[in-house]
Image (spheres, rainbow, N blue to C red):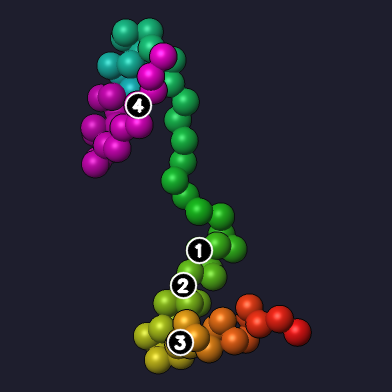
């Protein structure tokens, strides 16, 4: 059986879709798109570094992290 992924754009749409699925007795599994706190903090930190011009070229990154020692 095929599955579908639905992307409601508001709380009202989500509520309506859930009610519709329940009325049709269709099983569904709610899933959260919220990232873990440590991931969100890391993203925030990285964005601040970027805004402050603290960037590294891809070549420099490769040299630093992917070179064989």
Query: Mark 1 sits on what residue?
Result: 40
Q: Earlier in the sequence, mark 4 or mark 2?
A: 4
Residue 32 place in picture, x, y as percent: 46, 41
Image: magenta residue range: 1-17
Residue at 25% from the left image edge and 40% from the top image edge: 10
Q: Secondary structure at mark 3?
A: loop
Q: Quadrant of residue 25?
A: top left
Q: Secondary structure at mark 2?
A: helix
Labelled pair 1, 2 in contact (Cβ < 8 Å) = yes
Query: Mark 3 sits on what residue?
Result: 57
Labelled pair 4, 3 in contact (Cβ < 8 Å) = no
Label 4 crowd bin: few (<14), some (14–19), many (20+), radius 10 Å: few
Report if residue 3 is visible in the image: yes
Report if residue 49 is visible in the image: no
Examine the structure image and report whether residue 16 is included in the region drawn in magenta: yes
- Point out the image quarter for the N terminus: top left
**Distance of mark 4 from mark 3, alpha carbons?**
39 Å
- Point out the image quarter for the C terminus: bottom right
Q: Which mark is residue 44?
A: 2
**Distance of mark 1 from mark 4, alpha carbons?**
27 Å
**Distance of mark 4 from mark 2, alpha carbons?**
32 Å
């Amino acid at each position: 059986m095929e599955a579908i992924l639905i992307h409601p754009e508001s709380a009202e749409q989500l509520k309506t879709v859930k009610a519709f699925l329940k009325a049709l007795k269709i099983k569904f599994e709610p899933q959260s798109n919220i990232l873990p706190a440590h991931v969100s903090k890391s993203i925030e930190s990285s964005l601040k570094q970027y805004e402050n011009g603290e960037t590294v070229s891809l070549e420099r990154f490769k040299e630093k992290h992917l070179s064989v020692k």
